């Protein structure tokens, strides 16, 4: 029979700061530095940013607090958390969906994370300090992502790093790593943003980000902003249930949760303040640039900047760091499930799940040109398809069910009690209850309904 470790065996954060940095590390990732600028460019700039900010604070914060409460109250992984609060019901399946989703997201995320390492190593050899035409830059990107050997190798290397940290446990592995990496990330971002904004023409990029053009308003922009809010805050799959389960008794949970959301948003804005000023300064074409924005367009910009080679190293290093603190959290959710529910050792769980995930990531690694059959499935490539299925649909459904559970089944009084544990203040309880019980689920249903009605599934 599987043994259930006691809460002290499971490990916990050394304190509030350890939690905030680790959870912010989970939240801050490719979603902020790669996906946010891309969505902003496609969503018309300021308008997208405006709606995104609205969703982060009206929907993201309530859901983050709901997930953290579930973790703190149960000290369990997502499946165990629902099972403890609603035994003999189908609710643990919601946690199961979360664990599966963590696996699904990691299996495509690790591929893109691998590209960042590839770019970092090329930057270190001086590839990006030189003038590059858009064609040349595009060719470098295509070569990297379409070479089967490189793409699979880079994915594997990134998974190994992730396994190594998660194996180390909560305080010694995840917390220690993020405590070093997050300040480095922050410093690099500020440095690069200052450099970008002081370029001639750089302030036009700032204007693009902050001046909303309401004529661009469309259902697509709104949906994109909601999905981006969930993805960026790591919500909807129990990552915050898991991280909340290691939260020390007595510390201030609402403050910590809100801090994570603020941090995450600040970093996304900072990333935008690097990318848009740099693009405007270089006269790049903003709206037509897709996912290649940071991999294809930025290298051409670095080539035109003084000390561009160094800036490129700093930028790709920070992208890799941001990605690592996120892949850690994705693996941790699945690992915590096998530790809590199946009695596996941390080391066995980290290695087994990590290697299995690498194997499942191989089709995604090969779907960008290496294997033509994987490049066109339902009109898109396998990696993008996975990103949409797990990253958009599964997270939205997970967040919806979490709100229903917390608001209606477990109930707001218990949630408030857990949030206030340790005697901490919780202002705005009425509004928070309303948001978790009604507004958030409604917003998600309306969003999904729009997708079905318009038929824009991908
Ligand atoms: N939030 C991360 C990013 O912005 C990605 C991520 C990590 C994530 N863990 C998650 C997304 C859990 C959803 C759920 O890149």
Image (tube, rainbow, N blue to C red):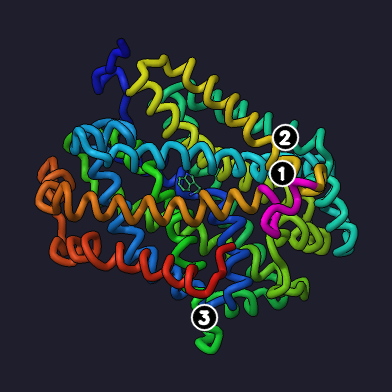
Q: Residue at x 9, y 51 (%)?
A: 413
**Label ID, residue 115:** 1
**Is 345 situated left or right of 324 in this image?**
left
Q: Residue at x 65, y 64 (%)?
A: 275
Label 1 secondary element:
helix
For the record, the magenta segment spans 373-382
Label 2 secondary element:
helix
Mark count: 3
Quadrant where the C terminus sits is bottom right
x then y, percent, for residue 297: 76, 62
Q: Residues within 10 Å of mark 3 (few under 14, many from 20)?
A: few
Instruction: Give the CA separation, mark 1 to mark 3.
Output: 32 Å
User: Between disc 1 and disc 3, whose residue precedes?
Assistant: 1
Residue holding disc 2: 154
**Is 39 situated left or right of 54 in this image?**
right
Q: Visible in this render: residue 236?
A: yes
Viewer-closest of 186 and 122: 122
Q: Check the image and report above or below for 405 versus 437.
A: above
Asked if ligand 1 lies within 8 A of label 3, the reply is: no
């Amino acid at each position: 029979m599987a043994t259930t470790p006691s809460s002290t065996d499971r490990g916990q954060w050394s304190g509030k700061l350890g939690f905030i940095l680790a959870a912010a590390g989970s939240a801050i990732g490719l979603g902020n530095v790669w996906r946010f600028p891309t969505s902003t460019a496609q969503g018309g700039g300021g308008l997208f940013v405006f709606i995104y900010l609205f969703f982060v604070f009206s929907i993201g914060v309530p859901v983050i607090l709901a997930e953290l409460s579930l973790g703190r109250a149960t000290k369990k992984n997502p499946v165990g958390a629902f099972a403890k609060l609603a035994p003999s019901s189908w609710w643990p399946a919601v946690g199961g969906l979360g664990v599966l989703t963590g696996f699904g997201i990691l299996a495509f995320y690790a591929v893109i994370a691998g590209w960042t390492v590839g770019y970092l190593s090329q930057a270190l050899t001086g590839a990006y300090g030189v003038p590059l035409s858009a064609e040349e830059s595009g060719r470098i990107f295509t070569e990297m992502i379409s070479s089967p050997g490189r793409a699979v190798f880079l994915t594997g290397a990134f998974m190994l790093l992730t396994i190594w940290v998660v194996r180390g446990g909560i305080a010694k592995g995840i917390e220690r790593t993020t405590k070093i990496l997050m300040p480095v990330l922050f410093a690099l971002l500020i440095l690069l943003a200052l450099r970008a904004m002081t370029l001639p023409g750089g302030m036009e990029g700032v204007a693009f980000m902050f001046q909303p053009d309401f004529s661009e308003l469309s259902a697509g922009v709104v949906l994109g902003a909601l999905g981006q809010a969930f993805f960026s805050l790591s919500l909807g799959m129990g990552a915050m249930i898991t991280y909340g389960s290691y939260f020390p008794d007595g510390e201030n949970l609402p403050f910590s949760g809100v801090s994570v959301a603020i941090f995450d948003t600040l970093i996304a804005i900072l990333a935008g303040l690097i990318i848009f000023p740099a693009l405007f300064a270089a006269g790049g074409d903003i709206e037509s640039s897709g996912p290649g924005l940071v991999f294809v367009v930025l290298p051409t910009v670095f080539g035109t900047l003084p000390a561009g080679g160094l800036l490129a190293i700093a930028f790709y290093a920070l992208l890799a760091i941001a990605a690592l603190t996120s892949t850690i959290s994705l693996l941790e959710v699945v690992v915590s499930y096998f530790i809590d529910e199946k009695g596996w050792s941390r080391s066995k769980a980290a290695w087994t799940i990590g290697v299995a995930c690498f194997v499942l990531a191989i089709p995604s690694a090969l779907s960008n040109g290496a294997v033509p059959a994987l490049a066109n499935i339902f009109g898109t490539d396998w990696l993008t398809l996975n990103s949409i299925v797990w990253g958009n649909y599964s997270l939205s459904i997970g967040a919806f069910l979490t709100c229903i559970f917390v608001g209606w089944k477990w109930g707001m009084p218990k949630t408030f009690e857990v949030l206030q544990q340790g005697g901490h203040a919780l202002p705005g309880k009425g509004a928070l209850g309303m948001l978790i019980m009604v507004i958030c689920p409604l917003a998600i249903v309306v969003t999904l309904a729009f997708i079905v009605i318009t038929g824009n599934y991908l």
